[in-house]
Image: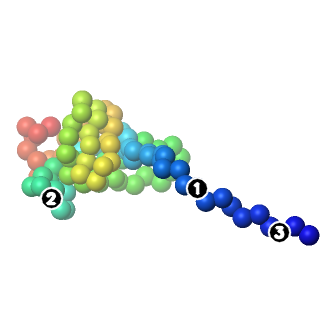
């Protein structure tokens, strides 16, 4: 009679890391509920998703703009924006039209 095999314990130190990324097709500026080092500027919008319920994504404060389309937030999420800013929703959130 044989004994059942036991799984090997993995002792490797290599790890896989996935960066959380959200793509927004309809987006606008918002003020984050909590500041991060005095920053409260954040972004909200509708994520690019096929055949799923539409939900609004709201980010943590924006830390860095890498280029015209890529932002990094305080919680480590990368946001890819597509299309123009939703001016009406941005103004509804208290931003002047000059911010658009």
> Residue 94 in the image: x percent, y percent?
11, 52
Q: Measure the C-alpha gap from mark 3 to mark 1.
A: 21 Å
Would you name the residue on which mark 1 appears? 10
Q: Is residue 25 visible?
A: yes
Q: Is there a contact, CB below 8 Å, between mark 3 and mark 1?
A: no
User: Going from the N terminus, do you reach mark 2 or mark 1 first?
Assistant: 1
Q: Is residue 47 visible?
A: no
- Answer left or right for 38 relative to 2: left
Nearer the camera: disc 3 or disc 2: 3
> Residue 11 in the image: x percent, y percent?
55, 55
- Answer left or right for 27 relative to 52: left
Q: Which quadrant: the N terminus?
A: bottom right
Q: Is residue 80 above or below residue 8?
A: above
> Residue 10 in the image: x percent, y percent?
58, 55
User: Going from the N terminus, do you reach mark 3 or mark 1 first?
Assistant: 3
Q: Measure the C-alpha gap from mark 2 to mark 1.
A: 40 Å
Check residue 3 in the rendering and tell me which mark sits there, or answer none: 3
Q: Measure the C-alpha gap from mark 3 to mark 2.
A: 57 Å
For numbered disc 1, what is the local secondary structure? loop
For numbered disc 3, what is the local secondary structure? loop
Question: Are there few (<14), some (14-19), or many (20+) residues within 10 Å of tag 2?
Answer: some
- Answer left or right for 6 relative to 54: right
Total marks shown come to: 3
Q: Quadrant of residue 9?
A: bottom right
Front residue of this view, candidates 59 and 78: 78
Q: Residue at x 20, y 47 (%)?
A: 62
Q: Residue at x 48, y 54 (%)?
A: 53
Q: Residue at x 19, y 45 (%)?
A: 63
User: Going from the N terminus, do you reach mark 3 or mark 2 first?
Assistant: 3
By what rule are the colours in the image chosen? rainbow
- Answer left or right for 56 relative to 11: left
Would you name the residue on which mark 2 appears? 35
């Amino acid at each position: 009679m044989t004994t059942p095999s036991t799984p090997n314990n993995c002792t490797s130190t290599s790890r896989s890391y996935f960066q959380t990324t959200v793509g927004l097709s309809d987006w606008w500026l918002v003020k984050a509920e909590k500041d991060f080092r005095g920053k409260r500027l954040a972004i909200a919008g509708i994520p690019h998703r096929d055949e799923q319920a539409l939900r609004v994504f709201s980010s943590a404060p924006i830390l860095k703009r890498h280029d015209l389309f890529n932002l990094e937030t305080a919680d480590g999420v990368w946001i890819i924006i597509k299309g123009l800013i939703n001016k009406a929703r941005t103004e509804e959130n208290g931003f002047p039209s000059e911010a658009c």
